[in-house]
Image (tube, grey):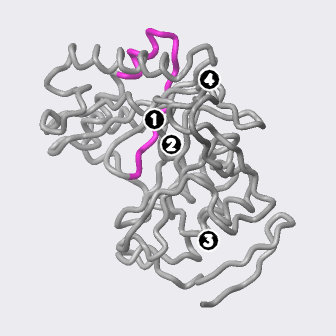
Amino acid sequence: MSEVQVDVEGRTLTISNLDKVLYPRTGTTKSEVLNYYAQVSPVLLPHLRDRAVTRIRWPHGVEGSSFFEKNAPPGTPSWVRTVEVPTTGSRSGKGDGTIRFPICDDLATLTWLANLAALELHVHQWQVDADGTPRHPDRLVIDLDPGEPAGLHECAQVALMVREALAERDLVCTPVTSGSKGLHLYAHLPGDLDSDGTTALTREVAEGLQKEHPDLVTATMTKAKRPGKVFLDWSQNSGSKTTVSPYSLRGRERPTVATPLTWDEVEAGAEDDLALEQLTLEQVLARVEELGDVFDA
């Protein structure tokens, strides 16, 4: 096993297997993944700050097996910030256990996670206090998941409907490609709703649009009812659910990224079914250099 020691913002890390190919279809190596996360960190880290991070790791690359990881693993450096968060069903602190989540607030921690082949970084819609107490959500998310033959074109059309429905509730949303098939829409919240209230609000929006546009929109989780429609997944606002972070890589055939978009791009995608695509890490780095962070929620 080849190893090198590097200094990242005053922290010494041991990095291994830089030449390991993590995305065989494109030949993308761990070195390129580490480089991506280092370069994108100025716009990624604000989306991770104070949020418990669930990771999906591919130690043998995306064509190998993967696993979810919530607890900080054995060997976690002492300088990595961690918080004890009540487990599902015990958010009041009266349940039967906690999860020791890492918090990724700095480049050193991000580099450590990338070295573990934690390609995907998923976070809740709520942040935590210093003692691990979950706050009320500071944002909501709706996942637009297309059922074939629907795709990004139909997602863009539905995204415009969701934007209007949220605007009627004085909420401004930001579009993000999922890096997989569809789009995510985020809206900032003032913090007066808990997770149950946020879930109820997003479900109301989704079911309202399903009623208005039954041929294109479904709010029903049953997969048999999704072909040709866009599923508005409102459930990711549950206190126990997470969503892949903006600017996180995805563990797909290509190194695609959950990428914030402008509404001009979404409007173009609603008109032209070739106008939107899931972007790769190379495209995102060039985009960030040109535009910075266009996320506005």
Q: Secondary structure at mark 1?
A: strand
Tag 1 residue: 175
In the rendering, which numbered label is found on residue 260? 2
Q: Mark 4 against mark 3, which lies toward the viewer?
A: 4
Q: Earlier in the sequence, mark 2 or mark 4?
A: 4
* Circle nearer the N terminus (1, 3): 3
Identify residue for label 4: 136
Kindly identify the amino acid type of the residue bearing the numbered disc 2. Pro
Q: Element type at marker 2?
A: loop
Q: Residues within 10 Å of mark 3 (few under 14, many from 20)?
A: many
Question: Which mark lies nearer to you, 4 or 1?
Answer: 4
Decide: is 109 above or below 168. Answer: below
Quarter of the C terminus within the rendering: top right
Nearest to N terminus: mark 2 or mark 1 = 1
| Residue corresponding to mark 3 | 115
| Residues drawn in magenta | 162-179
